[in-house]
Amino acid sequence: MKITDIQAVKLTMPDSVPSTSAAASSVTSPQHAAGHPATAPAAKPWRSGWAEDAEVANPMSRYPHVKRHRSMWLPKDWGAVWCKVTLEDGTWGLGSTAHGRPVAAVIDDHLAPQLIGQDIMAGEKLADMMFRLTKPYGTVGLASYAISAVDLALWDARGKVLDKPVYELLGGPQKESLPCYATGNDVDWYLELGFKAFKLACPHGPADGLDGLKKNEDFVARAREQIGDGCELMLDCWMAFDVEYTVRLAERLRPYGLKWMEECLLSEDFDANIALRQRLPWQGLATGEHWYTHLPFQWACAHRVVDILQPDLTWVGGLSTCVKIAAAADAAGITVLPHGGGGTAFGQHFTMAMGCADLAEYFIGSPPGVPLEQLRGIPGVPIAKDGVVIPSNAPGFGMEISEDWLTPFFG
Ligand SMILES: [Mg+2]
């Protein structure tokens, strides 16, 4: 079955779309603001969601004029982008990613003309072609976002042609359902929703000195007190630290039993990962959300620098790349918990199929008190109930998106 078209598109959902089957939030990164309800919710929020206003330590925190919030320095007008792949029998599939404007150009100007006419079933060939096509300008970074959207759309179309959910194409379900951990700082709300594992966004970093170190400890201590000893607690550090700061903070936080500290270092600094592993042999470490292609993950498995790998399916190169990462990690006895994996159809299908993925991240930035069912998400993507998600068994990724909600990105 030949591919007849590949195009970068925008998704615009009509206000009338019912939200009951929607994901809690398709938003899994600070590039997008917190998930907001589509219409006035029936339930009254307790307060606004943490992600709207909370300061989170980040690589730009050393510059006071943009320290307050990540939205002050992230690209404002790039938006999200989807990729639509159409086959000769009219079947079409969809994938999505971030950083729309430059990424859409890579899809339309380069990847699409090279892949149109190829066989949709030649999955490894198509993934390998995209990996090699982008070499002259770098497969990592923005090109990797474009590859991800195309690769996911190819998997969605392949599932629809074969009339199977994508997790069946990956070998079938490895588990019955996906236990999820809640990401965000509204811990009281996540407890109410039934989650049993929690990941906080660390508010302070080296720019806040000794006072920030103390405030970080108080912040983690408060969460541990809220959830008790029977729940897992993690801390996301979003590339904000160096080795020295991470070690100091980890030593202060040791009494609170963090399952892992996440992405403490700048993503390209591989030597720092080795140094951190040596200086913190007792602390669970996770990273990889800003790594691209399978190669850094293969390196991390070979050197065993972290315990948990966190590729983002919509950034790292798509599902094909994540399958390679899962094989390397599984062989090394390392866990793969995709970034934002519980809140997207893509992450849900990967996690359902893979033995090395035993927990799914569920980002929640919406206002506490508003049930997840009342939030607008992608129709057809199941939401977490009592901290557990069961992926859709509809063909492809199971997203219920109407074709007339899609328009060319560069219209
Ligand atoms: Mg993270």
Image: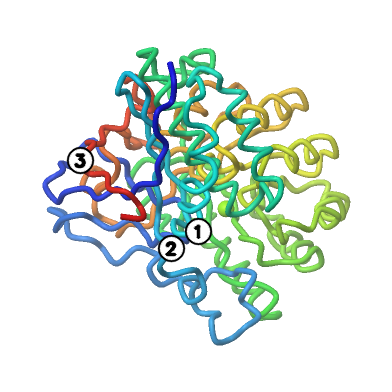
- The reply to whether the C-beta atoms of the residues labelled 2 and 1 are less than 8 Å apart is yes
**Tag 3 or tag 1, which sits nearer the N-term?**
1
Q: Position of residue 231 (x, y in %)?
A: 52, 42
Q: Which residue is mark 1?
A: 102
Name the residue beneath numbered marker 2. Answer: 78
Numbered disc in front, either 2 or 1: 1
Question: Which mark sits nearer the N-terminus, 2 or 1?
Answer: 2
> How far apart are labels 2 and 1 at the CA level?
7 Å
Q: Secondary structure at mark 2?
A: loop
| Left or right side of 15 for 199 | right
User: Toward the viewer: 272 or 46?
Assistant: 272
Q: Secondary structure at mark 1?
A: helix
Residue at 45% x, 51% y: name it: 28
The residue shown at (36%, 21%) is 88
Left or right of 382? Residue 282 is right
Kind of residue sitting beneath label 1? Pro
Query: Is 350 above or below relative to 256?
Result: above
Q: On the image, numbered disc 3 is attached to which residue?
A: 404
Number of other residues with Cα within 10 Å of mark 2, as a class: few under 14, some 14 to 19, many 20 or more: some
Q: Amino acid at mark 2?
A: Trp
Residue placed at 22% from the left, 44% from the top? 405
Mark toward the start of the polypeptide (2 vs 3):
2
Q: Amino acid at mark 3?
A: Asp
Tell me residue 49's x, y (percent). Answer: 34, 63
Along the line of sight, the residue nearer the viewer: 92 or 331: 92
Mark 2 → mark 3, Cα distance in angstroms = 22 Å
Image quadrant where residue 245 sits:
bottom right
